[in-house]
Image (cartoon, rainbow, N blue to C red):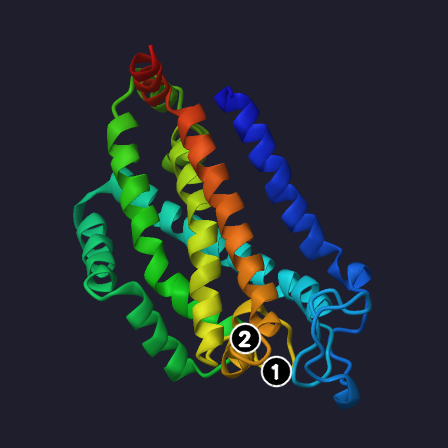
Amino acid sequence: MSTKLRVRLCAALALAVVLLALLSPWLTPYDPNAQDMAAALQPPSADHWLGTDSHGRDVLSRVIAGARTSVFSALILVAASAVSGSVIGIACGWFGGWLDTLLLRLGDLFLAFPGMVLALAVAGLLGGGMGNAILAIALVSWPKYARLARSQTLTVRSAPYLTAARMAGNGPARLMARHILPNIAGSLLVTASLDIGTMLMELAGLSFLNLGAQPPTAEWGSMMSKGRSLIQTAPWTILGPGLAIFLTVLIFNLLGDSLRDHLDPRRRARKKEQTS
């Protein structure tokens, strides 16, 4: 399968996940928050395809509703980390000097700690809630984008087209926005697409520890946390959200791999040599 076809296929699957999250309020067969204790812990059936949880809520409906929280939160987190990190990295690479040293040392400070451990500490200080969980992980995620953007900026800073643009009277802001960013966007896009699955799992991890989404919000990590005590008696309560996390992470990782292969001609050439 060609890399272009793989990108299109993976992009279509990723778009389907995003559309599912966007249209989830209209796709749930039942109210995801409606409790019916008389129907609690029913196994999968024709009425409830993924069974019901300990409060009698339809698991399938909550998985679909949870897509809105889980997927959009991961997308917002990646966008915030990528934008902030890229702006910092481009500025460091272009201006250099004390600004470069200060911001890089700040990034090193965040990178000195395991990301998830630092995110747990920040989320614990800020308190529960999806907004605080996004902020906590974003604070430890921007340095990798900053370092990538800085290295790419240093590579293209002395390119002839930038010299010509500078001589034409373009200021630093215009040079960075119109000439540098478009030329390094491919690497940033690949990193961001590969990061979506990672961020989704980290947000689910914080929710699993009750530091992310709070009841009664449907979120995949929170659903697994509530169902972990029932894994032996009612495994369907965690099967649905667990499978949703697995498939979503797989789709976005495949998309990132496909984009990397498509945007890197040297990698494609190496693969062609290996197969020939």
Distance of mark 2 from mark 1, alpha carbons?
8 Å
- Residues packed near mark 1 inside 10 Å, few (<14), some (14 to 19) or many (20 plus): few
Looking at the rendered image, the quarter that the C terminus falls into is top left
Mark 1 lies on residue = 215
Element carrying mark 2: helix
Mark 2 lies on residue = 222
* Numbered tag placed on residue 149 in the rendering: none
For this orientation, the residue located farthest to the top is 276
214 up-or-down from 135: above or below? below
Task: Tell me the residue at 70%/49% (across/down).
Answer: 19
Any part of residue 5 in sight = yes
- Residue 11 in picture, x, y percent from top left: 59, 36
Quadrant position of residue 65: bottom right
Any part of residue 174 in sight = no
Residue type pointed to by label 1: Pro
- Residues packed near mark 2 inside 10 Å, few (<14), some (14 to 19) or many (20 plus): many
- Residue 193 in picture, x, y percent from top left: 47, 43
